[in-house]
Image (spheres, rainbow, N blue to C red):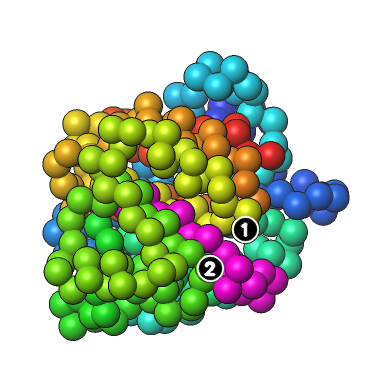
Amino acid sequence: MLLNTYNPGKFAFSKHSHDLKTLDEISWGILGVPFDSTSSYHTGSRLSPTLIRESSFSFEKYNFAFEKELTIPFFDLGNIEVVHGNVRKTLEIIESSVSELLSLNLKPILLGGEHSITYPAIKGLSNEFNINELTIIDFDAHMDMINTYQGEKYSHGTVMKRVHDLNPEKILQLGVRSSSKEEYEFGKNNKNIKIFSSSDFKDLNIIKEELLAINSSVYLSIDCDVFDPAYMPSVGNPIPNGINLSDFGELLKIIAKKDIIGFDIVELSSKTLGDPSAVNAAKIVYDFLTLIK
């Protein structure tokens, strides 16, 4: 065995897959989803699983920000073999892959890829969890609640409408600052949708209270465009006046104490190793793994 080497094909600190044979508790499995075939502005999010993994090696096992060491066992199992240009087939593969993770006693962490991947991930969880009792926490600049976008029913721009079709207990959208009038009216008229715009982050305590009140299982989705382009310029659809990483960290400390059954980070769109946006995305995954129970 060679010494002083690392494997940028896996997220830093990932356990070896052969350790799954001795796994005796529920853990986490990372899957990359290199799919961006419905992207409507900046393309390139299919490269993001590689960029996030490579960036993860800039961190140490002790998380200085949260004064806690990353100790939870997790397994990076590589990328899902998507079908570029075929969104429906790819969504079927993602759903099946997430279901298979559950059979291995692993909860999913998906590295996108575009936001369309969230819908099949939640569907894949439905074999074991009741979606009707699930809270979706969606950090996003956009509502993604339109029924069809550019003629496509299953798209990064329709993903939360498709998730809403599954009838979860609640969809909580945080950091929104862009939508169509149709989406705005749809969100306003549905009791199981609650929206906090990026301007609402001026009083973070109100959002903290909303998160603290959650008593159901949670699926967490983070679209990188929720952050201001000053922090995350390399995203599929950047929108000014976003949230900052410090406020997000404060909220993540609360969310991490909930019963999280799945997590994804999507819409990083870069083609450059070491891109600051990729480093920030990797830090979010690192912080999540550090904080979860």
Q: Vertical placement of 83 versus 231: above or below?
A: below
**Residue at mark 2:** 169
Local packing at callout 1 (Cα closer than 10 Å; few below 14, some 14-19, many 20+) is some
Per the image, the residue denoted by label 1 is 216
5 up-or-down from 160: above or below: above
Name the residue nearer the viewer: 129 or 202: 202
- Which is nearer the N-term, disc 2 or disc 1? 2
Q: Secondary structure at mark 1?
A: loop
Q: Which residues are magenta?
A: 125-141
* Labels 2 & 1 near each other (Cβ < 8 A): yes
Give the residue at x 29% y 67%.
Answer: 188
* Along the line of sight, the residue nearer the viewer: 199 or 36: 199
Is-magenta flag for residue 13? no
**Amino acid type for the residue under numbered disc 2:** Glu
Residue 116's place in the image compared with 60, above or below, is below
124 versus 63 height, above or below: below
Looking at this view, is 193 or 227 the one in front? 193
